[in-house]
Amino acid sequence: MAGAARQFWLFVIPFIVGFAAVGLLALSFFFPGELYTVDSTGYLLTAIVAVASLGIVVWQSVASERTVVGGIDEREQR
């Protein structure tokens, strides 16, 4: 159960953080200077957080799949 809970939270938290950062970047694009008053370094850091978080989501979803060496499942081998 601990492994499943860890996989769940390694998917949910980065998913929420990643899409929140992407949403913040989208809103700052439509409302420049009014919503997000930082310089270009802030935009860059927000983009890095978004990419890293969504990268963790992709990594976690790929790592949770069961595959054997070579990408062939055991039942398909002859």
Image (cartoon, grey):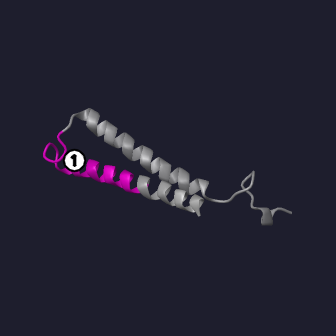
At label 1, counting other C-alpha atoms closer than 10 Å, the crowd grade (few under 14, some 14-19, many 20 or more) is some
User: Outermost residue, bottom direction?
Assistant: 75
Q: Which residue sits at x=74%, y=55%?
A: 68
Q: Which residue sits at x=38%, y=40%?
A: 48
**Magenta span:** 15-37
User: Outermost residue, front direction?
Assistant: 2
- The answer to which of 39 and 29 lies nearer the viewer is 39
Name the dominant secondary structure of the magenta segment.
helix
Left or right: 14, with 2 as reference point? left
- The answer to which of 26 and 61 lies nearer the viewer is 61
Q: Does the magenta stretch include residue 72?
A: no
In the rendering, at what x and y percent does residue 37 appear? Answer: 17, 40
In the rendering, at what x and y percent does residue 10 appear? Answer: 49, 54
In the rendering, at what x and y percent does residue 22 appear? Answer: 33, 51
In the rendering, at what x and y percent does residue 7 appear? Answer: 54, 57
Q: Is residue 67 above or below residue 35?
A: below
Q: Is residue 39 above or below residue 32?
A: above
Left or right: 74, with 58 as reference point? right
Residue behind mark 1: 28
Mark 1, secondary structure of its residue: helix
Q: Which residue sits at x=86%, y=63%?
A: 78
- The answer to which of 17 and 76 lies nearer the viewer is 17
- The answer to which of 22 and 11 lies nearer the viewer is 11
Amino acid found under the numbered disc labelled 1: Ser
Q: Quadrant of the N terminus?
A: bottom right
Q: Does the magenta stretch include residue 36?
A: yes
Tally the numbered discs.
1
Q: Is residue 65 above or below residue 39?
A: below
Q: Which residue sits at x=21%, y=34%?
A: 39
Q: Quadrant of residue 74?
A: bottom right
